Amino acid sequence: MTSTLVPAPDRLTAPRGGVPRRRTSVLALPEARWAAAATVLFLLALPLQLAGAPAWTWGPLYALTYAAGGWEPGWAGLQALREKSLDVDLLMVVAALGAAAIGQVMDGALLIVIFATSGALEALATARTADSVRGLLDLAPATATRVDGRGGEETVAVEELTVGDVILVRPGERVGADGRVLDGASDVDQATITGEPLPVAKERGDEVFAGTLNGTGALRVRVGRDASDTVIARIVRMVEEASETKAPTQLFIEKVEQRYSLGMVAATLALFLVPLGFGAQLTDSLLRAMTFMIVASPCAVVLATMPPLLSAVANAGRHGVLVKSAVVMERLGQVDMVAFDKTGTLTEGTPRLTDVRPLSGSGLDEGELLALAAAAEHPSEHPLARAVVDAARERAIALQAAEDFDSTPGVGVTATVGGCVVAVGAPARLLNGMTDTDRANVSRAAADLEDGGRTAVLVTVDGTPVGVLGIADQLRPGTGATVAALKSLTGTAPLLLTGDNPRAAARIGAQVGIDDVRAGLLPQHKVGAVRELEAAGRKVMVVGDGVNDAPALAAAHTGVAMGRAGSDLALETADAVVVHDDLTTVPAVISLSRRAGELVVQNVVIAGVFIVGLVVWDLAGDLPLPLGVAGHEGSTVVVGLNGLRLLRETAWRRAAG
């Protein structure tokens, strides 16, 4: 059998999320229908021949068997031959016709039947690989309820939605577009996109994805991406690209295949002609030569590479890692060092409030201090202001209305809250005019926070300092476990490449277990570090998210981008994308890639053992043609099915474990 890539799926399948996965039925495949027809015709002809019926009763049935089972591979082989490529399918058909020519009509027909059946099983295995990633878009509804500015509703095709539109998602419906919740609260099952086993609570400001299943609440969602640019659509494109690429191992095998096939044809002719020159019988020589041609064909070897790699691509995609090609999947397993960016990669990239420290003599407790600061910051769009306001909301603190709001870049904000002038900003900018005692108290509190890697924010009321807030970027969940897993997998501790200041970088490195921290780097410096490691023989994976990471992602052996936090440039440059920014999937996909490589080696060994064993049997003994056919085609099926093992959920769980 010739190697067949997974057909580029026009629709992707979701493996999880409560909707049954479409599975290709056997009879839906043309190869299976022709194989079934050839089998039925063979089973009608065989009893007649064995019963001694006249040849005219069973001869036409055998002829139809040859036509039904052999026309498709024969035609494909002739087309390949016209392009100066020798297809092993054509050799199988020639061997069957040769058997018929010397009176072995039944043996030739049996070869056709087994060959056609093997081809049907291979096609089914390939289709099942495609099924694992086909149809994810089927989970996204074809229509959505769009809400206009007057509150009116209309049902439109999701392709008509544009960025900025507002859609209504009722309980039990699937979200029609990627976007953010404007109003409402609900639990959303997004296992099809992120792999999270439990529904996720969604409320105002949270991101939702097309194709995910809404729970019991109603949501109004502002569309954030066109239908062609949703997470699901990106998965489609990446799987299409993966199905059209070939890994280096596959390319090597196909290169060897042509030379091997030509050598096999030459050996077959020699095996036929040499015995004839020494007086052997024509029938015996031709039968042995045809048997050799069949068992020596490299069908199983050709099929050894792509099923494991594409199965791994499909499985990784189901769990939120989009690997752009089979080439990338093979390269992932070769990684022996990982370099991380910091902000947006190891950390969430979003400032969060970590400390609320009232100053002595202020008379305020933590809640009162936070309430004042959040009320003053509420009108601001600055990231630090958002962190303060979000913290107050999380603690269910009621905020007073702010009046006379004013924002000064680089300094902070001021507003009148409850009749008092509240200022929130950088300590160094707000210390002017304070007493020496106040300045000393503020400086000590700010220094303590900054020594811990936090950003200090001063709060004053009517010019008097009342407290200091600490704000810091937070580590992503599972970061420490990810670093430890990568160290175990690669045998080398990851390193940190960041443009942040050395103190903050060192703190993050210490928290996650990274000793080699390189801070204050510009993009060209990150590239230089990667090339230095590559020159030392390392195969480096770079994991990043920003525009400044894109050059390093391109320079690395393998680049991985964070899907949600990642810039468009980083997403385009990277070889793989972690859709939901779950770092724990990075070591899992490396492990899955290595497992795919192991299966490729297994397949080559299985194929080689079958070929060598059958060839030796044919040359040294008397291998019956039907048994040779069964052994050869059986090895092809075994190799194909072995590669599909990585489609199973257990394969991912083992890799993640």
Image (cartoon, rainbow, N blue to C red):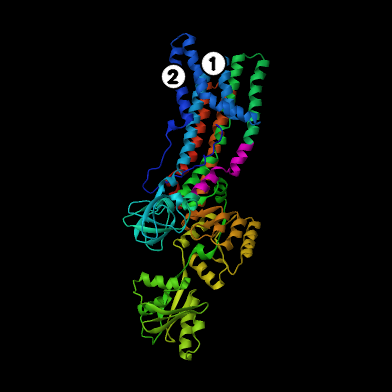
Residue 654 showing in the rendered view: no
> x and y percent of residue 127 in the render?
47, 37
Nearer the N terminus, badge 1 or badge 2?
A: 2
Vertical placement of residue 127 versus 373, above or below? above
Instruction: Determine which of the numbered discs, if any, sits on residue 104 in the image.
Output: 1
- Give, as a single range, the part of the protein colored magenta: 235-255
Neighbourhood count class around disc 1 (C-alpha, 10 Å): few under 14, some 14–19, many 20 upward: some
Query: In this picture, is 102 found above or below 235?
Result: above
The disc labelled 2 sits on which kind of residue? Leu
Instruction: Tell which of 474 and 448 is nearer to you.
Output: 474
| Location of residue 131 by image quarter | top left
Query: Magenta segment: does it hold 297?
Result: no
Amino acid type, residue under disc 1 in the picture: Gln
Secondary structure beneath label 1:
loop
Q: In the image, what residue occupies the spot 43% across and 17% down? A: 44
Total count of labels: 2
Residue that protrudes farthest toward the front in the picture: 150
Where, quadrant-wise, is the N terminus in this rendering? top right
Quarter occupied by residue 272: top right
Quarter assignment of residue 556: bottom right
Q: Residue at x 46, y 45 (%)?
A: 12
- Name the chief secondary structure element in magenta: helix
Q: Percent position (x, y) of residue 644?
A: 47, 40
Q: Which residue is mark 2?
A: 43
Residue at the far right: name it: 277
Q: Camera-side residue: 51 or 72?
A: 72
Q: Single out the mark in the foreground, 1 or 2.
A: 2
- Element class at badge 2: helix
Residue 519 visible in rendering: yes
Which label belongs to residue 301?
none
Q: CA distance from mark 1 to mark 2?
A: 16 Å
